[in-house]
Amino acid sequence: MRTEFTASEAVVFPGMGPSRFADVGKFMVINPYARRLVAQADERLGYSLVDAFRDTEGDYSRHAQVSFLVNCVALAQWAEGELGAKPEVVVGPSFGGKALAAYTGSLSFSDAVWMTYEFARCLDEFFATEFADVVTHSFVRTPQDILAQLFAEMDELGYWHDVSCHIDHDFHMVSLSRDNLEWFQQKLRRNGGMSLYTMHPPMHVSSFGPLREKIRTEVFDQLAFADPTLPVVNDQNGEIVTTGEQVRDMLLDGIVNTVRWPDAVATLKCLGVTKVHIAGQDSLFGRVAVTTKNFEVAAVDPKLAVSPRKRTAA
């Protein structure tokens, strides 16, 4: 890939895993960067985000999703202000694209809060009646050739499936019917694979065109996307994104397109990136081999941000 610029540092906003108030509540109420953004979120939502997050069950509730956005952006700002991070390019796989839009100014932070809440509302409404039996299952130790064999068996049996994420050469996320999940897990084990976790609602599925249209008309058509202040790497194909329209399309297309993290990594390498700051709670993108073998990885998470740090004497 030929590019017109180079970069040595990048910030990565990770996809969202289970987010619990007990893990991040302290950061949200004592970290000055987080408190500033929480106040802006409260103003847009019209109520206390911290209180709502604390009192609402569900790892992926609307309040949990907005809180994850707030924390990711706050951590990136904290890394710049307190750790000297100097990112020159940004990537936000999966949910991370929402934080990316806010951090780069493609959306105002207030609009990013509203978008995240309304996006989550659309997910709740859509999956209440459509694709209610579909889950997204993640697993490791399964190379592409083995996965292709499993897919061939599923096709013969008439088992619907779609690849949601390619995380590494042997790490994938596949969406399928909950009824076929046990069969799929057994096949994985017999071929040396190891299941990790199963998510609902599912995401990044080509059949979710109606969901993309719902979110476009009810959410994105109400927003104005500006050109990002930093170049962005598309998590679905590794292309460079530099305009507001491209950011908008990237976020919408993420509903129906597979996340291809190795493609994004390849672009970062091509740009000359040697260090990535993972801004947010992450157990995935900053830990897989395709990331750790290619970059110095700085994990910037809530635990680090509230831990006492040594000060260098003047």
Image (spheres, rainbow, N blue to C red):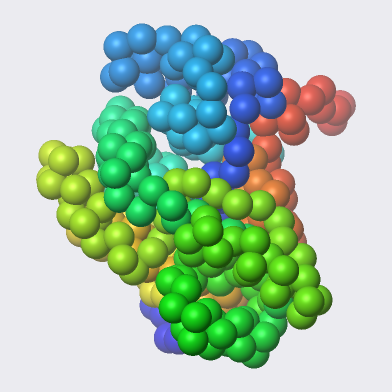
User: Which quadrant holds residue 117?
Assistant: top left
Quadrant position of the C terminus in the picture: top right
Quadrant position of the N terminus in the picture: bottom left
From the viewer's perspective, is 41 left or right of 73? left
Q: Residue at x 42, y 10 (%)?
A: 48
169 is higher (above) or lower (below) than 182: below
Instruction: Give the total number of marks visible in the rendering.
Output: 0
Q: How far from the left and from the top, in percent, is residue 118?
A: 28, 34
Q: Looking at the picture, tell me which residue is in the foreground, 1 or 52.
A: 52
Q: Residue at x 61, y 88 (%)?
A: 149
196 is higher (above) or lower (below) than 240: above
Q: How far from the left and from the top, in percent, is residue 214?
A: 19, 48
Residue 130 is at least partly visible in this image: yes
140 is higher (above) or lower (below) than 40: below
Residue 74 is at least partly visible in this image: no
Q: Looking at the picture, tell me which residue is in the foreground, 167 or 158.
A: 158
Q: Looking at the picture, tell me which residue is in the foreground, 253 or 27.
A: 253
Q: Residue at x 41, y 61 (%)?
A: 204
Q: Residue at x 65, y 61 (%)?
A: 182
Q: How far from the left and from the top, in percent, is residue 131?
A: 35, 53
Q: How far from the left and from the top, in percent, is residue 274?
A: 67, 67
From the viewer's perspective, is 208 left or right of 83? left
Q: Looking at the picture, tell me which residue is in the foreground, 75 or 67.
A: 67
